[in-house]
Image: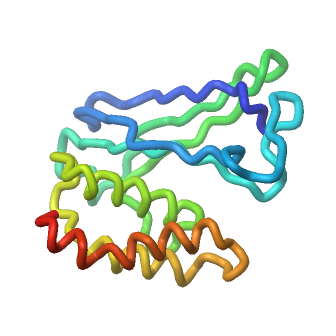
């Protein structure tokens, strides 16, 4: 288990990434039944996501194999090196992402669409609904919180279109 007080560090390769920004994060302890503390860490099977948007400096990032970023997690004083995970290119296929990652990504993108964010790019309500439906297929029927959040995204397509989003 990873303590909540663990520190996340991003090492961005500036020669391939022009800029990056935090889109959001999923806190598994918010509103959940399990108690997450620095001593107990994340319960088994729980995930914690931090979503960043990476803006490449070169188009080749989408076709060539590169390490773009290293995300490191220092786990307390006993293990300051913690673990390090490379973020590589080309991007992985959406279909191979976990249900939790798909849900977190859909909800982060939905927030950008609701705010009519400049950063939403070509994202539009119909694509948003399709991504939410795809994520919904992978979420277990017992996970009501994720399913309700995704259903909200699906059901709001016509409202978003009417609002000109």
- Give the mark count: 0
For the point 46% across and 27% down, the residue is: 11
Q: Which scheme is used to colour this image of the protein?
A: rainbow
Q: Is residue 34 left or right of residue 122?
A: right
Q: Residue furthest toward the right?
A: 39
Q: Is residue 43 left or right of residue 101?
A: right
For the point 83% across and 49% down, the residue is: 34
Q: Residue furthest toward the top?
A: 77
Q: Nearer the viewer, residue 92 or 15?
A: 92
Percent from the top left, x then y, of residue 101?
54, 60
Tell me the quarter of the picture where residue 130 sits.
Answer: bottom left
Q: Quadrant of the C terminus?
A: bottom left
Percent from the top left, x then y, of residue 123?
22, 64
Tell me the quarter of the picture where residue 152 sits.
Answer: bottom left
For the point 54% across and 26% down, the residue is: 9
Asked if 14 appears above or below 130 in the picture, the reply is above
For the point 42% across and 74% down, the residue is: 132
Q: Is residue 122 left or right of residue 97?
A: left
Q: Nearer the viewer, residue 154 or 105?
A: 154
Asked if 44 appears above or below 130 in the picture, the reply is above
Q: Quadrant of the N terminus?
A: top right
Percent from the top left, x then y, of residue 36?
80, 39
Q: Nearer the viewer, residue 76 or 11?
A: 76
């Amino acid at each position: 288990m990873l303590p909540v007080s663990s520190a996340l560090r991003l090492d961005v390769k500036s020669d391939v990434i022009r800029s990056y920004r935090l889109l959001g994060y999923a806190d598994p302890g918010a509103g959940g039944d399990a108690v997450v503390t620095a001593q107990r860490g994340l319960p088994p099977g729980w995930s914690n996501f931090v979503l960043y948007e990476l803006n490449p400096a070169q188009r080749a990032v989408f076709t060539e194999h590169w390490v773009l970023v290293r995300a490191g997690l220092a786990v307390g004083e006993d293990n300051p090196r913690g673990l390090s995970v490379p973020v590589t290119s080309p991007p992985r296929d959406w279909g191979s992402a976990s249900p939790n990652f798909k849900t977190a990504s859909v909800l982060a993108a939905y927030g950008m669409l609701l705010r009519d964010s400049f950063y939403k790019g070509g994202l539009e309500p119909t694509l948003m609904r399709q991504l939410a439906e795809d994520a919904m297929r992978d979420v277990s029927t017992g996970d009501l919180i994720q399913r309700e959040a995704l259903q909200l995204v699906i059901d709001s397509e016509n409202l978003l279109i009417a609002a000109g989003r």
